[in-house]
């Protein structure tokens, strides 16, 4: 399983990880892996369990309503696993288990947004609340991190500033 975790984290394309790769990295035979996990997807699914725990632990809980701290927390997580997350998103439609994991991640991110910005969202209801949550999601999404940090080569500080501006804009928008 440790070899699976390493391969998932380091492979350019998750869909290209093979049983031979896992066997070679773990020092056992393909037959042993099949006996233990049943298939390549079984190995990858088992390897995603500790990754899920690791990813959740990377986002430090902050006081609700503290925009600066919330963005710092999400950026800390993205700086550590952002590139892996982008690779997972690229493989989502090729591997059902990656899709399932990302769906759980999306739900977790939304729950985090509801907690992190609870004071600012408290008075909002219905469609307006949902619209703000969607906008907050966009303002804190991994794709925005990739755009700013990787594509536009912005510093972490510039990325933090941009995301804070976007979040504050969403939170202060009139109904």
Image: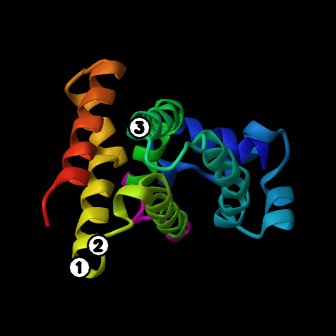
Asked if residue 125 is positioned above or below residue 122 in the image, the reply reads below
As for residue 10 lying within the magenta part, the answer is no
Does residue 65 appear in the picture of this structure?
yes
Say few, some or many: other residues with alpha carbon within 10 Å of mark 3 (under 14 / 14 to 19 / 20 or more): many
15 or 130: nearer the eye? Answer: 130
Q: Residue at x 23, y 79 (%)?
A: 127
Q: Earlier in the sequence, mark 3 or mark 1?
A: 3
Q: Please provide percent x and percent y for residue 27.
A: 84, 39
Q: Residue at x 44, y 59 (%)?
A: 118
Q: Which quadrant of the figure has residue 35? A: bottom right
Label 2 and label 1: CA atoms lie apart by: 5 Å
The residue pinned by badge 2 equals: 130
Q: Which stretch did the figure color magenta?
A: 90-98
The residue pinned by badge 3 equals: 71
The residue pinned by badge 1 equals: 127
Say few, some or many: other residues with alpha carbon within 10 Å of mark 2 (under 14 / 14 to 19 / 20 or more): few
Q: Residue at x 83, y 50 (%)?
A: 29
Asked if the residue at tag 1 contacts the one at tag 2, i.e. Cβ–Cβ closer than 8 Å, the answer is yes
Asked if the residue at tag 2 contacts the one at tag 3, i.e. Cβ–Cβ closer than 8 Å, the answer is no
As for residue 91 lying within the magenta part, the answer is yes
């Amino acid at each position: 399983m440790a070899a699976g975790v390493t391969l998932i984290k380091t492979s350019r394309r998750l869909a290209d990880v093979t049983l031979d790769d896992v066997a070679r990295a773990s020092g056992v035979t393909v037959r042993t892996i099949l006996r233990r996990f049943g298939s390549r997807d079984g190995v990858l699914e088992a390897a995603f369990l500790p990754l899920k725990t690791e990813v959740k632990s990377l986002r430090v809980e902050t006081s609700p309503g503290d925009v600066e701290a919330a963005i710092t927390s999400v950026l800390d997580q993205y700086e550590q696993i952002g590139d892996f997350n982008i690779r997972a998103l690229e493989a989502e439609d090729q591997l059902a288990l990656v899709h399932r994991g990302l769906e759980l991640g999306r739900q977790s991110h939304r729950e985090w947004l509801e907690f992190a910005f609870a004071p600012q969202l408290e008075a909002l209801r219905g469609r307006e609340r949902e619209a703000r949550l969607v906008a907050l999601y966009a303002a804190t999404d991994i794709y925005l991190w990739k755009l700013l940090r990787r594509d536009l080569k912005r510093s972490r500080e510039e990325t933090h500033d941009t995301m804070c501006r976007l979040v504050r804009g969403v939170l202060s928008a009139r109904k």
